[in-house]
Amino acid sequence: MARVTTLQLLEKHAAILALRCPLRRPARLRLVKSKANHGATYLCRDGFWLTITRGSRAVMLDTLIHEWAHARAWGRGKDHGDKWGIEYARAYRVVIGEDKA
Ligand SMILES: [Zn+2]
C-alpha cells in the first residue's frame, strides 16, 4: 500500500471539512517552513490560502483545524474571539469524528 503523505492526509481532512464546515470561498493548503508560527490564513482573490508549518502530523492537523476556523470566522469578530472559538470547536469535532450529524 502506498504511503500517505502528510499533504494528502491534510487534504483528506480539508475535503471533509469543506463538506461539513463549508467556507464562503475555496481553500487551498500550502505547507511551509517557519519558525514564526504554526500556520496562517490569507484571503486572496482566488480564495483562502491556509499555510501550515511543517512539523509533526498531530500539530499540523491541529493547525489545519485552527486555520480552518479562521477562514470560517473571517471578518467576524476578533482573531481568536467567540466566533472563531465556535468554529474551532465545530471543525475539531468534525475531524475527530464526534460530529456525525
Ligand atoms: Zn489563530
Image: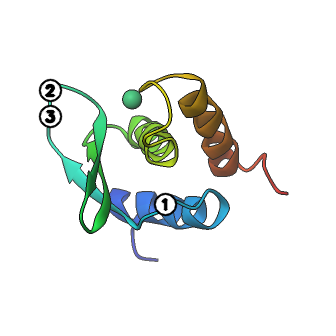
Q: Mark 1 near ligand 1 (CB under 8 Å)?
A: no
Is disc 3 in contact with disc 2, using a CB cutoff of under 8 Å? yes
**Within-10-Å neighbours for mark 2: few <14, some 14–19, many 20+:** few
Indicate which disc residue 14 carries: 1
Q: Is residue 98 above or below residue 20?
A: above
Q: State the residue in front, 33 or 45.
A: 45
Quadrant in which the C terminus is drawn? bottom right
**Within-10-Å neighbours for mark 1: few <14, some 14–19, many 20+:** many
Indicate which disc residue 29 carries: none
Residue drawn at 41 percent across, 38 percent down: 63
Left or right of residue 100, residue 26 in this image: left
Amino acid type assigned to the residue bearing label 3 in the image? Ser
Amino acid type assigned to the residue bearing label 1 in the image? Ala
Left or right of residue 38, residue 16 in this image: right
Q: Is residue 70 above or below residue 83?
A: below
Amino acid type assigned to the residue bearing label 2 in the image? Lys
Residue drawn at 78 percent across, 49 percent down: 99
Q: Mark 3 near ligand 1 (CB under 8 Å)?
A: no
Question: As drawn, which residue projects farthest toward the right?
Answer: 101
Q: Is residue 6 above or below residue 46?
A: above
Q: Whereabouts is ligand 1, in terms of quadrant?
A: top left
**Within-10-Å neighbours for mark 3: few <14, some 14–19, many 20+:** few
Please give the residue where the numbered disc 2 appears in the rendered image. 35
The image shows residue 13 at horizontal and vertical percentages of: 53, 59
Q: Mark 2 near ligand 1 (CB under 8 Å)?
A: no
Residue drawn at 78 percent across, 45 percent down: 98
How far, Cα to Cα, is label 3 from label 2? 4 Å
Please give the residue where the numbered disc 3 appears in the rendered image. 34
Residue drawn at 42 percent across, 64 percent down: 25
